[in-house]
């Protein structure tokens, strides 16, 4: 059986990655439709190595007869058009933040909680988690199963691609300007991002956290376990693609670094690169273009009972967005009667 698939936000970073991932994984499509805003009408995007799609206007598109829609157009657009698509019988897999904490909408990472898809027809909308949450829970799920996580302390080092194409352009232009003894005004970010780090992603909340940090806390609870305590500090760094995380974990039961390493070696979606030598770890540069969540620097934390530290890296445009959405579609086709 094959499916008519629409990609919403097809001209953006994640939309293009969704099209590439659908093609690369040979998802059974009968037709692929590229949808974008009116200003992108007619813009061409690639599907695979040989096929070129011409983007159509989302507002004008009738989703009747479309089986699956992968959405990544921004939360305000998904708010309007995802329910419209769902009401016309299309299953929406939404990459924006808008539906993630809706109790009636599953928030899914297939390696972690695919069973949450069982009631997907209730709203016909499935949410993709935040990219930073996603890579973390892929790495932590097998460890949680083995020893039960009590508390997580995570610091993120998030690439500018997570803020879109304009953010990538700003890093490029500022870096080039500094080498020319020139300056470029910060527009996308609150401060200069070139040769700098910014401890601020998304808006500030009343308690001093940013919304990005709040997302990591609440989404981890919804996906993995509501009893886990999570505290996060999210930082933007001058890297084009690939998010990194330093994660400190406290377990209910003992789990050695060697045991954790062995568990993660066999875990779906995880690749362990953990040699205690120069270069024996993964960085965003090596993770870019790869599907896996990479785990390195696994070691015991002797300052707490049953503690571990690890380093986690993933391509935020792939597993952090596009790949996870396609994997959800694959799961629906394989196991949930779509």
Image (cartoon, grey):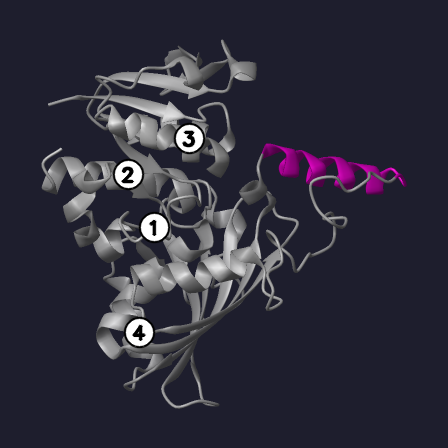
Label 3 vs label 4, nearer the camera: 3
First in residue order: circle 3 vs circle 2: 3
The residue tagged 2 is: 125
**Magenta span covers which residues?**
165-182
Whether label 4 touches label 1, CB < 8 Å = no
Q: Secondary structure at mark 3?
A: helix
CA separation in Å, label 3 and label 1: 15 Å
The residue depicted at 33 percent of the width and 66 percent of the height is 140
Q: Earlier in the sequence, mark 3 or mark 4?
A: 3
Q: Which secondary structure lies at badge 1?
A: loop
Report x, y in % for residue 190: 73, 49
Q: CA distance from mark 3 to mark 4?
A: 43 Å
Q: Residue at x 63, y 37 (%)?
A: 168
The answer to whether residue 273 is seen in the rendering is no
Q: Position of residue 244 (x, y in %)?
A: 51, 57
Q: Quadrant of residue 128?
A: top left
SS label for mark 4: helix
Callout 3–callout 2 Cβ contact below 8 Å = no
Residue designated by label 1: 102
- Which is in the foreground here, disc 2 or disc 1? 1
State if disc 1 and disc 2 touch (CB < 8 Å): no
Picture disc at residue 80: 3
Q: Which element type, helix, strand or loop, lies under badge 2?
A: strand
In the image, is residue 172 part of the stretch drawn in magenta? yes
Tell me: residue 257, above or below residue 324: below
The disc, 4 or 1, on the residue closer to the chain's N-terminal end is: 1
Q: Position of residue 106 (x, y in %)?
A: 27, 49
**Residue assigned mark 4:** 260
Q: Earlier in the sequence, mark 2 or mark 4?
A: 2
């Amino acid at each position: 059986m094959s499916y008519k698939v629409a990609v919403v936000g097809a001209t953006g970073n994640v939309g293009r990655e969704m099209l590439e991932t659908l093609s690369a994984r040979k998802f059974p499509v009968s037709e692929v439709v590229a949808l974008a805003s009116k200003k992108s009408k007619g813009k061409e995007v690639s599907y695979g190595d040989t096929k070129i799609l011409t983007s159509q206007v989302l507002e004008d598109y009738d989703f009747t007869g479309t089986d699956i829609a992968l959405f990544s157009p921004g939360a305000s657009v998904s708010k309007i058009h995802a329910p419209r698509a769902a009401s016309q019988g299309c299953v929406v897999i939404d990459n924006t933040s808008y539906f993630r904490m809706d109790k009636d909408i599953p928030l899914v990472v297939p390696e972690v909680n695919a069973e949450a898809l069982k009631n997907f027809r209730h709203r016909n909308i499935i949410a993709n988690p935040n990219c930073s949450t996603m890579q973390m829970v892929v790495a932590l799920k097998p460890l949680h199963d083995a020893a039960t996580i009590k508390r997580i302390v995570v610091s993120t080092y998030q690439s500018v691609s997570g803020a879109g194409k304009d953010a990538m352009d700003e890093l490029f232009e500022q870096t080039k300007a500094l080498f020319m003894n020139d300056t470029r005004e910060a527009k996308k970010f609150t401060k200069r991002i070139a040769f700098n780090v910014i401890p601020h992603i998304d808006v500030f909340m009343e308690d001093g956290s940013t919304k990005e940090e709040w997302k990591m806390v609440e989404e981890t609870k919804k996906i993995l376990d509501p009893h886990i305590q999570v505290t996060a500090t999210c930082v933007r760094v001058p890297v084009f693609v690939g998010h990194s995380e330093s994660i400190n974990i406290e377990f209910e039961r003992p789990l050695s670094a060697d045991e954790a390493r062995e568990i993660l070696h066999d875990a779906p979606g995880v690749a362990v690169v953990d040699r205690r030598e120069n270069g024996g770890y993964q960085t965003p540069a090596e993770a870019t273009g790869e599907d896996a969540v990479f785990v390195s620097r696994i070691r015991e934390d002797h300052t707490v009972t049953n503690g571990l530290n690890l380093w986690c890296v993933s391509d935020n445009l792939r597993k952090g967005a596009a790949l996870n959405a396609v994997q959800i579609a694959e799961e629906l086709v394989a196991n949930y009667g779509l």
